[in-house]
Amino acid sequence: MIELDTLRKSYGDEVVVDDVSLTLETGTITAVVGTSGSGKSTLLKLVNRLVEPESGTVRVDGTDTRALPLTELRRSIGYVIQDNGLFPHWSVARNVGAVPRLLGWPQDEIDARVSELLELMRLDPERIGPRYPHELSGGQAQRVGVARALAARPRMMLMDEPFGALDPVIRQEARAELAAIQRRLGATVLLVTHDMGEALSLGDQIAVMEAGRLLQVGTPAEIVLSPAAPQVRALIGEDERGFRHLALLPLAPLVRPNRAHVPTGGAELGEPLAAGASCADALSRMIWTGARMLPVAGQAGEPPGVVAIEDVLAAGRAGGPQTGRSGRPDGVGSGCDGRRNRGTGR
């Protein structure tokens, strides 16, 4: 859906985006990750022409964005920034309805859309809609910013460090909400972050930048298992690679269906893990509780089962340095990593 073709941008003698090419497939999340000054935010702004490239092309559905009216382009793309960018003298409802109003929507459609989005963001329209930005918590304000970006039903969303100002608990909730909303709406998302954990948890595709250039583009599993440069390895964290890999592996394929292993009611082993839990979730609880086996809730009406620590550790080892017949690390592109490589970069 979005193609970045040999983009270059400099300020004076400093090149901030250097020959970057990247393809974003429709309905996927691409996370651009890098340290401060790596050029990731400038790359984002080149897409909606807040910054113009010196050379190279941005295409949306095959059309050069320079051929599109600038106002039309920007209104078709949702844009979310770290400090939410809400108009302080407008109510929440007016902020969320700003773009539909510019597009000439009837007021009753605007009101319905505002209520729909606030409810989607778990914000009460009657209670939150009349408030002003200064009357909101940081988490509420950021959710309003996302609601505003979604108001005109954009097929594309650009997000620049959208959760960076939130506290850890709210940030985790906001990430989960974004993933759920993106799956529901099918939007194509370009997300900029300095947090590799955030990129790995949200991205279908990850692009790592350093000094204006792309160092590596790949699925989360490819980035974790086969970092292409020391800078990529540093962003992952050498001591965290194993746990980051386990966080990408769904627990479901490891669950043993034999209920004979499950104590009556599961009380002795604690509350069951969710059916959609990751291997990292299981290992974390095992470390914390000392249990070597945990109950896991059944999926879609299936009976519960159990997972054993040796199976979790074996799954992690299966994606280690050794390679399978495909020449890629074992687990990459298989059912084990729980993701598909829907995006590409070059």
Image (tube, grey):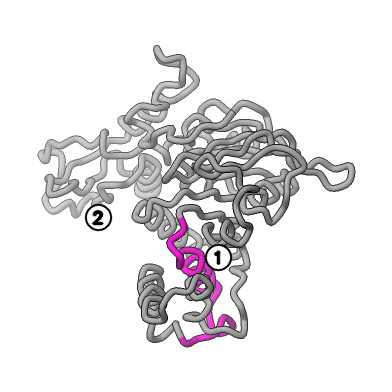
Q: Is residue 251 left or right of residue 302?
A: right
Label 1 environment density (alpha carbons within 10 Å; few <14, some 14–19, many ≥20)? few
- Please check the rendered image and state whether residue 98 is part of the magenta-colored stretch, yes or no: no
Residue 136 magenta: yes
Please state which of residues 126 and 262 is positioned toward the viewer in this rendering: 126
Q: Is disc 2 in contact with disc 1, using a CB cutoff of under 8 Å?
A: no
Magenta-colored span: 130-154
Can you see residue 191? yes
Mark 1 residue type: Asp
Q: Position of residue 311 (x, y in %)?
A: 30, 30
* In the foreground, 143 or 156: 156
Q: Position of residue 91 (x, y in %)?
A: 53, 84
Residue 173: which quarter of the image? bottom left
Q: Which mark is residue 167?
A: 1
In this view, 316 is above or below 30: above
Number of residue marks: 2
Residue 150 x %, y %: 46, 64
